[in-house]
Amino acid sequence: MHEAGRRTERVPWGAGEEITVYRPTAGRDSEYHLFFDDRGLLIGYIGILYEGLDLAAQRDYTTWLAKQTPTDFLLPAEVSGRAAGLRSGRLYGDQGERVSARAITIPKDERQILYLDSGVLTPYLPLLSPYKPEFLFKIHLPPGAQPRATYGPGDSESRDYIARQHFAKGEVAHFGLCGQKENDAAIEAYLRAIEIGLSEPLYQAEAHHRLGLAYRDKGALSQAAAEMETSLKIRPSIPEVVNHLGKVYSLMGDKTRAAEAFHTAIGLRPNYADAHFNLAEAIEDTQPRRALTAYDNYLAYVENTPGEKERIEKAEKRIEALKKAGK
């Protein structure tokens, strides 16, 4: 299994490709799995150091570990019997808006020995984790040995896995995680995920929700509303989706349906500041007193929330204007 020098292997990874690079790292044999989407975009890696790397001299890495809360777990029986002290591992994780990292260490005396680490674009995090048997089994794998075979089709061969790849691709494009937002690419990816078929209702509903947001950002409001309505048929009573649907209705000029949606969102989550603000805007012309209350509620719930300065100022000005108008 451990070969000197460097070599690579390429295999399909669902809709994309996985390239495995075998090479020395810090003088230790290792392998790195690089994952690419169907456009050739690198979306993540998982690295395996067979014999582990003592992190005592890796100050930046140990500083990062110290900021995380680890989860202890028992190693597979095949692994724990390979060397003394191989009983349990620690999984560390840091989920960022754009990139998320994972690390698996095994304590040795007072030191941490790193065996696996990964970095992936956050939307792909549910699909790529070093905490999987095929990676864990390679810890202290004897030279020339092969890891235990996995039975049944690999995850990346299943329709659901491929659909979730497309969903993640849509997230990367929609939120511009690799540059500018790409609405057309996001719409195409979400549609493909829905077409292939997502097995879990949560993903089914969220794919329609995200597709609706992408249509909204493109200005295709009727399509946006239809997708969000479909999302709510699959998973009713999700306040964020109801609120976003209300915003689409408002953009379409249907203030009545918009207000109904915002009321529903607030009923589902009474302290939902965004919905209170949206409700105030929707009913300001027809129900000014209730709009005043909604603005006041927004200010109460949004207090000390980062990024809300502009809307807070707007709400305060609207309250002042409504009061001056004697409404």
Image (spheres, helix red, strand yellow):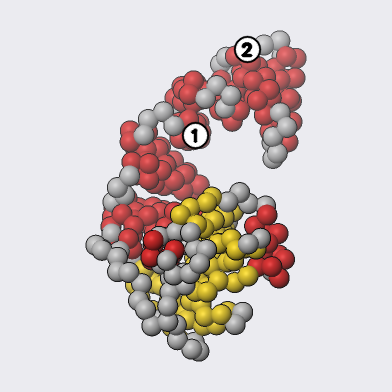
Quarter containing the N terminus: bottom left
Between 252 and 125, the one lying in front of the other is 125
247 over 25 or under it: above or below: above
Query: Mark 2, mark 1: which one is toward the viewer?
Result: 1
What distance separates the C-alpha of mark 2 from that of mark 1?
25 Å
Q: In this view, does 26 lie to the left or right of 231?
A: right
193 over 295 or under it: above or below: below
Circle 1 sits on which residue? 240
Residue 67 at x, y percent in the picture: 67, 52
Quadrant in the rendering for residue 79:
bottom left
Please name the amino acid that badge 1 sits on: Glu
Q: Which residue is drawn at 71% across and 10% down?
A: 326
Q: Which residue lies furthest to the top in this view?
A: 326
Circle 2 sits on which residue? 289
Q: Residues within 10 Å of mark 1 (few under 14, many from 20)?
A: some
Tag 2's secondary structure?
helix
Quarter containing the C terminus: top right
Q: In this view, does 299 lie to the left or right of 282?
A: right
Q: Which residue is drawn at 28% across and 57% down?
A: 159
Instruction: Give the mark, 2 or 1, whose residue is nearer the N terminus.
Output: 1
Between 304 and 63, the one lying in front of the other is 63
Q: Is residue 226 visible?
A: no
Please name the amino acid that badge 2 sits on: Arg
Q: Can residue 1 be seen in this view?
A: yes
Residue 236 at x, y percent in the picture: 37, 30
Residue 171 at x, y percent in the picture: 47, 53
